[in-house]
Image (tube, rainbow, N blue to C red):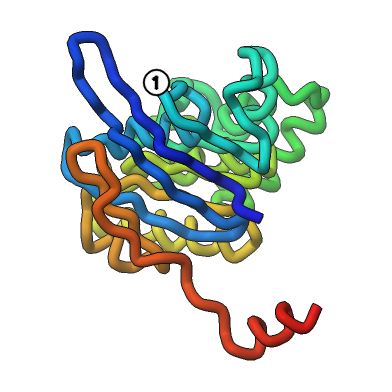
Amino acid sequence: MSLVEVERARREFPGGVVALDGVSLRIGQEELVAIVGASGSGKSTLLNIIGTLDRPTSGRVRIGGRDVAGLDDRRLSALRAHHIGFVFQRFHLAPGVPAVRNVAEGLLYSGVPLPERLERAARALETVGLGDRLDHRPHELSGGECQRVAIARAVAPRPRLLLADEPTGSLDSASGREVVELLRRLNGRGTAVVVITHDRDIAAELPRRLEIRDGRLVGDTGPPRKPEADRTAEEAK
């Protein structure tokens, strides 16, 4: 079953500005996907709609089989808190706050007691290679390390879907490669990852690429084909 289903999504803003124009796509439960396009192409609007931060003017969006149009704000917030993680170009870390507490904030609305939040935050930082930076504050970390803290915060709630909007945009090339490799590793552990980027070199490294232009989906390399043995086994079920 697809984790994300978008059907003929259109997003129009006041003044007749059309940011998305009839976009349809599906993303599998363990896919690693790049959505690529120039500035103003509509790719960030698409991410906001997939992440339920915005609603389409028309069309339908399903996350995990649930039609988000039927969810009120409270249930949408719960869906995001438990199933969707966000990483942005700007790290949005609280200044002067240790990394472990910045990550623990990502669990604030999960109903988890503080000691468990801190424990899970520490494990998430270990996952992104910062187990020795728990007490470091943002000004004591490099840009790449700050982005890894932001990724740890996004994955601490164990989301099924991680949405990354230009996650390498403010990093040097070496740090950017490290972040992309980290996203690959997280995907390998079963998290679906969608990366929004204008960088075609980064997009070319990922298994599937969707291209957005003028609010329309103009290219899709399609999900990676499964090995023949895997397909045969599934067909025999």
How many numbered marks are there?
1
| Quadrant of the rendering where the C terminus is positioned | bottom right
Most distant residue in the top direction = 14
Residue at image coords 67%, 35%: 66
Give coordinates of residue 26: x percent, y percent.
50, 51
Give coordinates of residue 50: x percent, y percent.
48, 36
Give coordinates of residue 110: x percent, y percent.
74, 25
60 and 33: which is toward the camera: 60
Most distant residue in the bottom direction = 229
* Quarter-of-image position of residue 107: top right
167 and 219: which is toward the camera: 219
Residue that numbered label 1 is attached to? 57
Residue at image coords 22%, 53%: 199
| Quadrant of the rendering where the N terminus is positioned | bottom right
Binning the other alpha carbons within 10 Å of mark 1 as few (below 14), some (14 to 19) or many (20 upward) gives: some
29 and 180: which is toward the camera: 29
Label 1 element class: loop
**Is 206 placed above or below 29 here?**
below
Q: Is residue 205 left or right of residue 70?
A: left
Residue at image coords 34%, 45%: 196
